[in-house]
Image: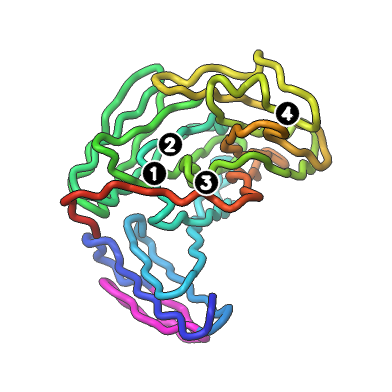
Amino acid sequence: MLNNTDVIIRYPRDQTVPVSVTYSGMTFQQIQLTKLTLGSLVSLQLQSPEDLSGTLVYANKPVVVYSGNRIQSSITSYAADVTLDMVLSVDSLSYNYITVPFPGNSTLKLVALYDDTNITIYGPIVRIYRLARAGDVGMMALESIGFHYLKSDVYHPFYAVSLSSGFLGSCLTSLTPGSLWTKLYSVYVKSDQQAVFVVMERNSTSKFIVDNTYISAELCSLIADSALTGCTLHLNSGQHTLGFNETDGRSAAYTWHSSNAQSSFCHSLSTAESPKDIQVNIQSRRKF
């Protein structure tokens, strides 16, 4: 971040336990609101025993926000897995997302940006989740492992995070909105058979390339109630390039890897291109 960056942090409306704010070597407690002016490359940390989902961070200059968790391992009572994810900016949020089949028991976390946000989850079972107020948080367990399509009615943008926890470790990753999809990805694979999940338009599958080789259609499946296809790739160790070399196709890509029975990581692959601007038609709906 830049010098003289004014930051305002507004915590969830139902927050009851003070949040510990650590800044410049000092720690203080606050419940509803935090206001600070930060210098270049200066950070602050928020800690709470309660879920801080629904917290809104304002800044007058660009900032980066990370969300982290420590959760108890399912293998041993004393071990803990640390999960870390970069939070998307409000301007990048979308009204539709795709989940990918990370191993373990998957749960969706949904955060409303507007009042009266109704989200439909398409999969083997179609379900509707209703969020009454801006800032409301919903948690939904997915009945099956696989690709799921999420869409809100009347084009209400919302925030979606996938959480996965099982005997292979824990995952937490923001689902990538279409505005941040890109043409090419570069990924380094540390060990053989690392899983990479890719989402693209249905008619783009035959043009998708991994290291100059077209992927097999057998690795992909149609995603229910969407015009999209999901593919599961297993790559050997080394550097790989994924995407479309000579077409205008775009995709979202996620990686998952387990180094042992107690440790794993997953995240969305970073784009190498500038994301397209997202234009949202906002009518008379109340925002935060």
How far apart are the alpha carbons under marks 4 and 3? 19 Å
Sequence-earlier tag: 2 or 3: 2
How far apart are the alpha carbons under marks 3 and 1? 10 Å
Residue denoted by label 3: 180
Report if the CB atoms under discs 3 and 1 are less than 8 Å apart: no
Looking at the rendering, in which quadrant would you find the N terminus?
bottom right
In the figure, residue 102 lies in which quadrant?
top right
Label of residue 94 in the image: 1
> Would you say 241 lies left or right of 249 here?
right
How far apart are the alpha carbons under marks 1 and 2? 7 Å
Residue denoted by label 4: 209
Sequence-earlier tag: 3 or 1: 1
Instruction: Write the residue at 26% across / 34% down.
Output: 153
Residue denoted by label 2: 97
Q: What residue type is labelled 1?
A: Ser
Sequence-earlier tag: 4 or 1: 1
| The one of 250 and 262 positioned closer to us in this rendering | 250
Q: Which amino acid does label 3 sit on?
A: Leu
Report if the CB atoms under discs 1 and 2 are less than 8 Å apart: yes
Residue 279 versus residue 4 in the image, above or below: above
Q: Is residue 101 visible?
A: yes
Q: Which amino acid does label 2 sit on?
A: Tyr
Looking at the rendering, in which quadrant would you find the C terminus?
bottom left
Colour logic: rainbow
| The one of 279 and 124 positioned closer to us in this rendering | 279
Which numbered disc, 1 or 2, marks the residue closer to the eye?
1
How far apart are the alpha carbons under marks 2 and 4? 23 Å
Q: What span is colored magenta in the figure? A: 20-38
Which numbered disc, 2 or 3, marks the residue closer to the eye?
3
Q: Where is residue 120 in the image (x, y as percent from the top left)?
A: 30, 30
| The one of 171 and 181 positioned closer to us in this rendering | 181
